[in-house]
Amino acid sequence: MTIAIMQPYFLPYLGYFQLIKAVDKFVIYDDVNFINRGWINRNNLLVGGQAHLFTVPLKEASQNKLIREIELAEGDAWRKKLLKTIQQAYQKAPNYSTVFPILEEIVHFNAQSIAELAVYALQKINFHLGISTEIISSSTYYQNSSLKAQERILDICRQEGAQTYINPIGGMELYNKSTFDEQKIQLYFIKSTLTPYPQFKNAFVPWLSIVDVLMFNERAAIHQLLTAYELI
């Protein structure tokens, strides 16, 4: 059993999906504190040849609340605005007619929280791409919120009977391989690479939302992109 544990991100970049595809079970870390100005409720689209940040508005978001407690802002104005931005940015992209209806379903999903919306989006895109990794939420299982940082990750690995844990490379300073080895768990860090792909006639802008990857690449090409990483 190979697992990964990540906070829920809405329409994240390709590297997030590389991590999902690399494991057997992907744990959504939704019962940890929300991070303001992080990537939970925002990402970048390609607008006018440049990265353009979109943000899903939230209701009373605070770093004193758990992610699963953060509700979406009321009303549909932000949904209409986001879909209009995607439509204007990508309506001439080669896969627009296939991808835009999926994004409409995602954006109009009747979620109450940003975590719920993010997980639904991940599941819809995984289904579209044929990624079969099981996704579960940490708040639903484990009962170990009293543990912190590395000890909680290790406990989740133990409860799952995981032999391997994969973390984004940004966590290299947070986790100790020898500590995982003592628990008979292999620790790896995923180092993503990205082969440039055509984005209209613009200079390539890397690491945008998965929306950009979906709009410009057929599924077979995306599967190649999803395996373009190194485990270290």
Image (cartoon, rainbow, N blue to C red):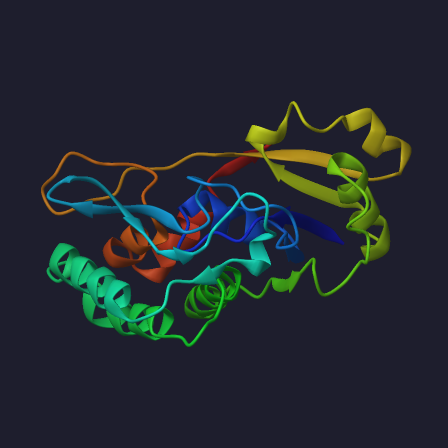
Report if residue 232 is visible in the image: no
Quarter assignment of residue 37: top left
Vertical placement of 148 versus 159: above or below? above
Q: Residue furthest front?
A: 60
Q: Is residue 125 left or right of residue 188?
A: left
Q: How many marks?
A: 0
- The image shows residue 77 at horizontal and vertical percentages of 24, 67
**Which residue is at 55% across, 43% downward?**
63
Report if residue 102 is visible in the image: yes
**Which residue is at 20% across, 62% downward?**
81
- The image shows residue 119 at horizontal and vertical percentages of 52, 63
Q: Quadrant of the C terminus?
A: top right
**Which residue is at 43% across, 34% downward?**
193
- The image shows residue 24 at horizontal and vertical percentages of 67, 57
Q: Quadrant of the N terminus?
A: bottom right
Q: Residue furthest top?
A: 173
Closest to the observer, 145 or 158 = 145
**Which residue is at 46% across, 43% downward?**
15
Q: Is residue 163 left or right of residue 229?
A: right
Vertical placement of 161 versus 44: above or below? below
Closest to the observer, 114 or 185 = 114
Vertical placement of 92 versus 47: above or below? below
Closest to the observer, 223 or 114 = 114
- The image shows residue 145 at horizontal and vertical percentages of 77, 50
Closest to the observer, 146 or 130 = 146
Vertical placement of 173 versus 140: above or below? above
